[in-house]
C-alpha cells in the first residue's frame, strides 16, 4: 500500500449502504468505492468488493471464483450426507449451485424451458392476473402501488411460470421470500438460520407439487417440461428441479419487486418519456436498463467465494473469503455514461450487464422485462394521467436494495 493510499479515510466511512445518506443519494458512496481500487476490502461485511466493470465481466465469463455458498468461510458447516436437511440437499451439488460442469449441463438442458415462446405463453397466463389486480383496485383517487399491485406480481408470475397450483400459494408465500437471506452476510446468524428453516419448508411444498405433477402430468407448464427433461437426461434429477425452482423464486421475487417500484417511480419522475419507454417490449427493455442505472437501487453485489488461497487483482485472498461483484458502482461514472445525471430511456448500453454476463446470465431476464412491461402498460392504460402523490420515503429495513415504504400514486381520473 502506498502512503497516499494509507492516508485515505477508511472506505466504510464513505460507503455505507445501510446509512441514511446512502438511501437518500447512493451516488457519492458508489463513486468513492469505485475509485478506491479494483478490489477493496470491506471490513463491515468481511468481504472483498470487486469494483471495476472489466474485471467483473472477466470474472463472470471465466468463473475463476466459486458460486457455491458452502465455500464461504462463514457458511454453516457442510454436514455429512446422512444429516442433510432439505436445505443442504438443495444447496450442495445441485443445479445452479453445483460445479461448473453440472451448472452448464443444467443450463443447456433446461434452455428450452426459457425460450421466447414459453415466455409468450407465460405472459398469456399472467395477463389475466394483472388485469384482475387492477379490476380489484377499481378507480380510487390515490393508492399505494406497492401493496395493491407490485407486491403481488413477482410471486404470481413465478408461481404461474413454474406451475405451482394456487392452493399452495398461501403456504409457500410465507416461506419462500426469505430464501435470499440464507446467504446474506449483512444480517445476523439467527436471521440467516430462520431463513434456512423457511427454505426447508418451501422445499417440502415444492416436492409435494412435483409428486402431484408426476401423478398428473400437464402439457404446457415449466414443471412438466422439467419432468420431461429429467426423463431424457440421467444426470438431471429431482433435486436439480427443486434447486432450480428455489433459485427462480429466490432470484426472481426480490429483484422484480424492486424493479416494479423503480420502474413506476422513474417514469413518473419523467412522465414525458413514459410513452417512448412503453412503445414496444423492445423499447421497454432498453428503458429498463436506464431505469436501473438512474435509480442505483442496489445495496449489495453478486457473491463469489475464493476456492483456494489465491491472488486476485493484486491482492492475496484467503480460501473461503467472499468477493462481491458490484457492477452498479459505475452507473454514475461519466467515463461509462455521458451526462449520468440525465435520465434518457433511449440511452445506449453496450455492453448491457444488468442481467449479468456469461454462463450465469439471468435465466429470468425475458420474463422479468415482460412482466414489468405488462404491468406498466396496464397502469398507464387504466390511469393515463397517473402521477406521484408524494415523494416516497425510503425503507431502511431492506438489506439488499433501496426500496420505498410506500409508493402512493394519484390517479387524476
Ligand atoms: C429485474 C429483474 C432481474 C434482474 C435485474 C436480474 C439480474 C440477474 C443477474 C445480474 C444475475 C447474475 C447473478 C450472478 O452472477 O451471481 C441473475 C441470475 C439469475 N436470475 Fe435474475 N434478474 C432479475 C429477475 C429474475 C427473474 C424474474 C428470475 C426468475 C424467474 C430470475 C432468475 C435468475 C436465476 C435462476 C439466476 C441464476 C442463473 C445461474 O446461476 O445460472 N431473475 N439475475
Image (cartoon, grey):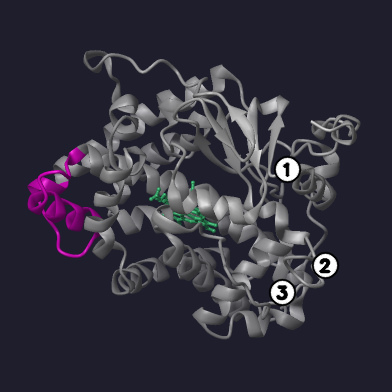
* Disc 3: CA contacts within 10 A as few (<14), some (14-19) or many (>=20): some
User: Is there any visible trace of residue 206 in the rendered image?
Assistant: yes
Find residue 204 and report its image quarter: top left
Relative placement, left or right, of 169 versus 59 is left
Does the numbered disc 3 mark a residue whose Cβ is under 8 Å from ligand 1? Answer: no
Q: How many marks?
A: 3
Range of residues picked out in magenta:
213-238
Find residue 175 and report its image quarter: top left
* Disc 1: CA contacts within 10 A as few (<14), some (14-19) or many (>=20): some
Mark 2–mark 3 distance (CA, rounded to whole Å): 24 Å
Is 301 part of what is drawn in magenta? no
Q: Nearer the viewer, mark 1 or mark 3?
A: 1
Mark 1–mark 3 distance (CA, rounded to whole Å): 23 Å
Q: Name the quadrant of the C terminus.
A: bottom right
Judge whether 286 appears above or below 336 on screen. Answer: below
Chain-order first, disc 2 or disc 1: 2
Relative placement, left or right, of 207 versus 255 is left
Chain-order first, disc 2 or disc 3: 2
Q: Residue at x 48, y 26 (%)?
A: 72
Chain-order first, disc 1 or disc 3: 3
Q: Residue at x 33, y 58 (%)?
A: 161
Kind of element beneath mark 1: loop
Picture coordinates of residue 182, whole percent (x, y): 48, 29
* Disc 2: CA contacts within 10 A as few (<14), some (14-19) or many (>=20): few
List the residue tagged with mark 3: 386
Mark 2–mark 1 distance (CA, rounded to whole Å): 23 Å
List the residue tagged with mark 2: 341
List the residue tagged with mark 1: 395
In the rendered structure, find residue 18 and report the number of the disc placed on it.
Answer: none
273 or 321, which is in the foreground?
A: 321
Relative placement, left or right, of 233 versus 98 is left
* Label 2–label 1 contact, CB within 8 A: no
Amino acid at each position: 500500500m502506498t502512503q497516499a493510499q494509507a492516508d485515505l479515510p477508511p472506505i466504510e466511512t464513505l460507503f455505507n449502504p445501510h446509512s441514511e445518506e446512502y438511501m437518500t443519494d447512493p451516488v457519492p458512496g458508489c463513486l468513492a468505492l469505485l475509485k478506491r481500487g479494483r478490489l477493496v476490502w470491506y471490513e463491515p461485511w468481511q468481504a472483498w468488493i470487486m469494483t471495476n466493470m472489466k474485471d467483473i465481466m472477466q470474472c463472470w465469463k471465466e468463473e475463476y471464483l466459486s458460486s457455491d455458498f458452502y465455500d464461504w468461510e462463514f457458511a454453516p458447516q457442510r454436514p455429512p450426507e446422512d444429516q442433510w436437511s432439505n436445505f443442504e440437499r438443495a444447496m450442495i451439488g445441485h443445479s445452479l449451485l453445483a460445479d461448473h460442469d453440472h451448472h452448464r449441463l443444467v443450463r443447456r438442458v433446461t434452455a428450452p424451458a426459457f425460450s421466447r415462446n414459453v415466455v409468450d405463453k407465460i405472459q398469456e397466463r399472467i395477463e389475466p392476473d394483472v388485469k384482475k389486480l387492477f379490476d380489484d383496485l377499481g378507480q380510487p383517487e390515490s393508492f399505494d402501488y406497492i401493496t395493491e399491485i407490485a407486491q403481488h406480481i413477482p410471486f404470481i408470475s413465478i408461481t404461474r411460470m413454474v406451475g405451482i397450483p394456487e392452493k399452495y400459494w398461501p403456504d409457500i408465500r410465507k416461506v419462500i421470500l426469505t430464501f435470499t437471506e440464507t446467504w446474506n452476510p449483512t444480517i445476523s446468524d439467527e436471521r440467516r438460520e430462520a431463513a434456512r428453516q423457511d427454505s426447508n419448508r418451501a422445499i417440502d411444498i415444492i416436492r409435494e407439487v412435483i409428486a402431484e405433477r408426476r401423478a398428473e402430468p400437464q402439457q404446457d407448464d415449466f414443471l412438466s417440461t422439467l419432468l420431461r427433461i429429467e426423463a431424457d437426461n440421467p444426470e438431471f434429477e429431482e433435486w436439480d428441479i427443486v434447486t432450480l425452482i428455489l433459485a427462480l423464486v429466490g432470484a426472481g421475487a426480490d429483484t422484480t419487486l424492486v424493479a416494479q417500484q423503480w420502474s413506476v417511480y422513474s417514469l413518473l419522475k419523467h412522465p414525458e418519456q413514459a410513452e417512448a419507454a412503453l412503445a414496444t417490449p423492445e423499447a421497454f427493455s432498453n428503458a429498463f436498463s436506464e431505469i436501473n442505472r438512474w435509480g442505483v437501487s442496489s445495496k449489495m453485489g453478486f457473491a463469489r467465494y475464493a476456492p483456494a488461497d489465491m491472488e486476485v487483482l493484486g491482492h492475496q485472498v484467503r480460501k473461503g473469503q467472499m468477493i462481491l461483484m458490484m457492477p452498479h458502482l459505475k452507473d454514475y461514472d461519466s467515463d461509462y455514461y455521458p451526462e449520468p445525471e440525465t435520465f434518457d430511456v433511449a440511452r445506449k448500453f453496450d455492453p448491457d450487464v444488468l442481467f449479468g454476463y456469461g454462463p450465469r446470465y439471468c435465466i429470468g431476464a425475458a420474463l422479468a422485462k415482460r412482466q414489468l412491461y405488462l404491468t406498466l402498460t396496464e397502469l398507464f392504460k387504466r390511469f393515463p394521467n397517473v402521477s406521484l402523490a408524494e415523494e416516497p420515503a425510503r425503507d431502511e429495513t431492506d438489506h439488499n436494495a433501496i426500496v420505498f415504504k410506500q409508493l402512493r400514486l394519484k390517479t387524476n381520473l
